[in-house]
Image (cartoon, rainbow, N blue to C red):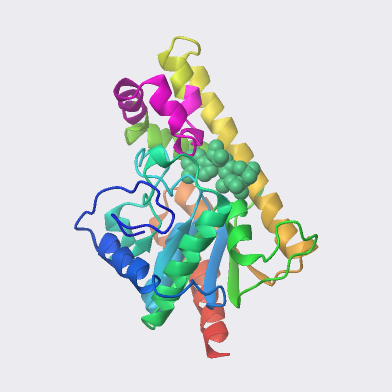
Amino acid sequence: VAAGRSPLRIPLPPPTTTKEDSCCSSSSSSSSSSSPTTQTPMVVIVGATGTGKTKLSIDAALALGGEVVNADKIQLYAGLDVTTNKVSLADRRGVPHHLLGAVAPEAGELPPSAFRSLASAAAASIAARRRVPVVAGGSNSLIHALLAPDRRGYRPALRAPCCLLWVDVDDALLAEYLDRRVDDMVAAGMVDELREYFAATTPAQRAAHAGLRKAIGVAELGDHFAGRRTFRAAIDDIKANTRDLAVAQVDKIRRMADAWGWPVRRLDASGAVRARLDGAGAEESACWERDVRGPGIAAIRGFLAD
Ligand code: ATP
């Protein structure tokens, strides 16, 4: 989203010099003269939190000349980068990212319909520059808003040609990995980040952050800072809520594939996650290439050739 100009008149963060902001500026201006098309062919990568869909989206963008459009409803907002697990600039490997930390928290909660407008405009702009839009999806409500024509439809049809890839990990293994990831996020500064957030904002300001404050960790550690929950209990709740989120996300992806008949191609990242948990870096890379990146990029190439 371009800073300083928005069709939705939402407050946006000031421009920075990062590559993704300049790219997003062009996406917004190029979409201003016509309504955003919803027919732009897109690569859409879905998967539960922690499965590697962010990594695959960047791998795919690098291999195919693409740009990433974020569809995680919490990562839309600026702030709480550790808590919301936003991909770092280094890990983006130069790939422009749209709608990542692009909405000011004071804007409240971005409705899915507004996301659809912004993401469609970004995708159309990327395609107009002859690059491939790669939507990295975490939130079913946003993927649905972007790809389904009618929210109430029992079996919504896809309204744009899509290569839909699902990065999946065995349930028990993912639960183990997510617990470890919460510990890693704590080590990376999640608690300090949230302590500063609570110190720097009033309850009224936080109430106005209707989207961002739903991030897992805000309520749990907020209770701890207020003396209502022990630190241990807060971290345990963050782990449990993260595991529950992953289960709910997988249920929704299964519904897309099974009930709606959307052509979702499943990629099994279990081997890579197992190797990562074991600290086996070479094995992790080999599994990722064999099971996820290789077949994922082959599927996208087939889609783009059609
Ligand atoms: P629902 O409509 O049930 O909210 P959804 O598909 O729109 O589902 P999800 O992505 O499944 O949205 O997120 C559900 C909840 O999980 C969020 O409201 C938030 O509490 C938490 N959550 C999701 N993504 C993140 C994230 N990146 N960081 C922290 N918490 C998150």
Which contiguous range is marked in magenta?
192-220
Q: Which quadrant holds residue 152?
A: bottom right
Whether residue 36 is visible, yes or no, is: yes
**Which residue is rendered at x = 39% and y = 79% of the image?**
131
* Frontmost residue, 294 versus 93: 93
In magenta stretch: residue 232: no
In magenta stretch: residue 217: yes
Which part of the image, by quadrant, shows the N terminus?
A: bottom left
Residue at the outermost left position: 17
The image position of residue 205, as x and y in percent, is: 39, 27
The image position of residue 268, as x and y in percent, is: 60, 62
Q: Is residue 70 left or right of residue 198?
A: right
Residue at the outermost top position: 227
Q: Which quadrant holds residue 153?
A: bottom right
* Frontmost residue, 268 versus 34: 34
Quadrant assignment for ligand 1: top right
Instruction: Count every numbered label the image shows and give the total.
Output: 0
Q: Is residue 135 left or right of residue 166?
A: left
- 140 above or below 163? above
* Frontmost residue, 233 versus 116: 116
Provide the major secondary structure of the magenta segment: helix
- 101 above or below 194? below
Which part of the image, by quadrant, shows the C terminus?
A: bottom right
Q: Is residue 9 left or right of residue 170?
A: left
The image position of residue 27, as x and y in percent, is: 36, 69
**Which residue is rendered at x = 53% and y = 25% of the image?**
236
Residue at the outermost bottom position: 306
**Which residue is rendered at x = 65% and y = 73% of the image?**
159
- 171 above or below 189? below
**Which residue is rendered at x = 61% and y = 75% of the image?**
160
The image position of residue 49, as x and y in percent, is: 53, 48
